[in-house]
Image: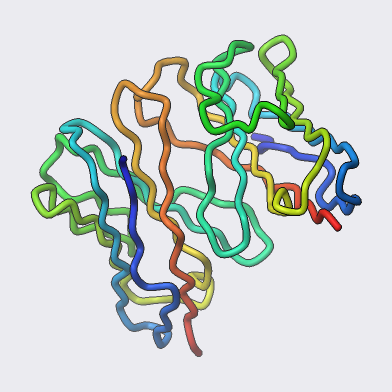
Amino acid sequence: EAGVAQSPRYKIIEKRQSVAFWCNPISGHATLYWYQQILGQGPKLLIQFQNNGVVDDSQLPKDRFSAERLKGVDSTLKIQPAKLEDSAVYLCASSLGGTSGSGDTQYFGPGTRLTVL
Amino acid sequence: AQTVTQSQPEMSVQEAETVTLSCTYDTSENNYYLFWYKQPPSRQMILVIRQEAYKQQNATENRFSVNFQKAAKSFSLKISDSQLGDTAMYFCAFHPSGTYKYIFGTGTRLKVLA
């Protein structure tokens, strides 16, 4: 079974530039998550999709971050414009279930390490 | 606010020994799930063990077991017969039932020494 794929693995940009990350979840997984993991901290959930609908984006800085999930499969996360404090690893995860709060196991991708200079 | 606290930033253990990683959480919820995830160096995060709060029996997965104390809001992970491959960051996570929230602790870096 193929795991969660993410690209690119690394990205270095200047502040105020734009950047986009791509995620392909495990086939058949209804729920997709984007996390931000700043060095020395635990992952922070940015946004969660069930199929192609957003179910929680309460911690997404919507003035600069946006995300979409196309046809309930792949997802992209965009930052525009980037700030220094956006330097982090961006993790994508997916889980099988389509029901909230069911405690499904999340399967994580390798992450994209973003450095903003 | 719901929080997860891992009070041990770093730990080390000798190969074949036993180590316990601590995790406490703060919530007013009665139904929830708790997880331990492992993030090896430069590799992706994987689930180690999962506990449902309504189950009193502690979860076990081979060499990994938890001590779940609901009243104390404590969820520690015990690794028996530690192996070099157990070297990783370990994150405790909390998920209230019926919500979309997942809250992670700051992690414990475990190093297994040969």
Residue B79: x and y in percent read: 33, 69
Residue for point 70% across, 52% down? A85
Number of callouts in the render? 0
Residue B1: x and y in percent read: 31, 40
Q: To which quarter of the image does residue B66 belong?
A: bottom left
Residue B8: x and y in percent read: 37, 73
Placement of A45 over or under A111, stated as above or below: above
Residue B93: x and y in percent read: 38, 47
In the image: residue A8, left or right of residue A31: right
Q: Looking at the image, which is closer to me, A106 or A39?
A: A39
Placement of B18 over or under B64, stated as above or below: below
Residue for point 41% across, 79% down? B11
In the image: residue A41, left or right of residue A109: left
Q: Looking at the image, which is closer to me, B86 or B69?
A: B69
In the image: residue A63, left or right of residue B114: right
Residue for point 32% across, 54% down? B61
Snapshot colouring: rainbow
Q: Looking at the image, which is closer to me, A19 or B53?
A: A19
Residue for point 75% across, 48% down? A112
